[in-house]
Image (tube, rainbow, N blue to C red):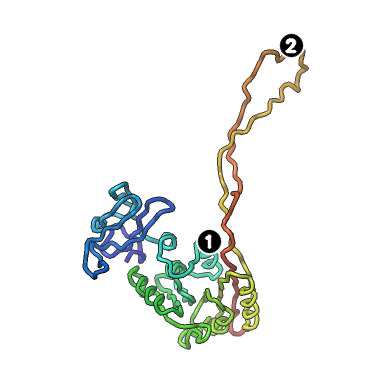
Amino acid sequence: MSFAGPKEIIAEGDTVVLYLTPALMHTIDAVPQIRNKKNEMIEYVFQTSFGALKVRDLIGVRYGSRVQLTKGWAHVLQPNPELWTQTLPHRTQILYTPDISMILYQLEVRPGSVVIESGTGSGSLSHYFLRAIRPSGHLHTFDFHEERVAKAREEFVAHGLGDNVTVRQRDVCEQGFGDELNGVADAVFLDLPAPQLAVPYAAKALKNEGGRICSFSPCIEQSMRVCEALGKCGFIEVQNIEVLQVEDCVRTRNVPVMELDFLKTKRTETDGKDMKTPRESKKYITSTAPNTMAGHTGYLTIAELPPLFAR
């Protein structure tokens, strides 16, 4: 029940983030025993680069505490979608915070919204959707891969989010989202190899009052095909966005101050001989762009479906 709401104490079965460094974190389940390859129950000892941790000792510890490892220490944190994205087991390529934040903003997701997502993948974006729509909203997420669907459903239940999400196995490009979802969604998100095939089904799934759609495409050719399909299905205000994250390098620099007092008076031949004055300098905080930056991830194609009477 780690994601369902703020907690103070780690309970047995919680998902816990073991924070070692900003670039090194692990997600573990707070259980005293696990099964080994021989299907035998053994003591759960988690190995890290800073030594081993007996997971049983985490139960009853306060979130945010520092725990001792055999060769160092770590902090135990309650997971959130941002930390989960950095530590989740990858079953597919995932979306990261820069793209996800733009998706949530453009789809206007809020508490109570009904959202359709395809495909589920590793569940990175799904956790952000669920945080945004809870407690009264619902997420309908689809994936064509049976094993991924089963694993995602298991994770949502373990994280205390099962009441707000329905996971289905379906090829939405061929079968759509199902008649039961026609006219119920506030927003639709597509992350598919051929998203243009699912656009007509998305138009049926959005409410009569209208709604918004977003499609993630790694290449511009995919995005162009989606734009054409959106126009044919009555969508308006079609936009194509690429999110590039740039981290400026902030540092303090010492800048020498030029002495210009000599311009005010006329110098003689004896002035300045055998005299050395220290050069004054001032400190300034500067910001520069990095030499390299993260490259292209994908294009976000966003559009709005007007109310039924205006289509």
| Quadrant location of the N terminus in the rendered image | bottom left
Counting other residues with Cα less than 10 Å from the Cα at mark 1, is it few (<14), some (14-19), or many (20 or more)?
Answer: few
Dot 2 amino acid type? Thr
Drawn side of residue 231 relative to residue 294, left or right = right
> On residue 270, which mark appears?
2
Quarter of the picture holding the C terminus: bottom right
| Observer-nearest of 282 and 174 | 174
Res 148 label: none
Rendering quarter of residue 266: top right
Instruction: Tell me if residue 105 comes above or below residue 65 in the rendering.
Output: below
Q: Earlier in the sequence, mark 1 or mark 2?
A: 1
Residue 245 at x, y percent in the picture = 57, 57
Please state the horizontal and vertical placement of residue 176, each as a whole percent of the image: 51, 85
User: Farthest residue toward the front?
Assistant: 38
Q: CA distance from mark 1 to mark 2?
A: 65 Å
Q: In the rendered view, does 311 fall on the left or right side of 49?
A: right
**Disc 1 residue type?**
Pro
Instruction: Work out which residue is located at the far top of the displayed protein and give it.
Output: 270
Residue 102 in the image: above or below residue 277 = below
| Depth check, front residue: 65 or 180 | 65
Number of callouts in the render? 2
Q: CB atoms at circles 1 and 2 under 8 Å apart?
A: no
The residue positioned 37% from the left and 71% from the top of the image is 156
| Element type at mark 1 | helix
Is residue 276 placed above or below 156 in the rendered structure?
Answer: above
Across and down, in percent, residue 237 comes to 64, 73
Residue sitting farthest toward the bottom:
179
Give the x, y percent position of residue 66. 31, 49
Q: Which residue is mark 1?
A: 98
Q: Tag 2, which secondary structure?
A: loop
- Disc 2 crowd rating (10 Å Cα; few below 14, some 14-19, many 20+) is few
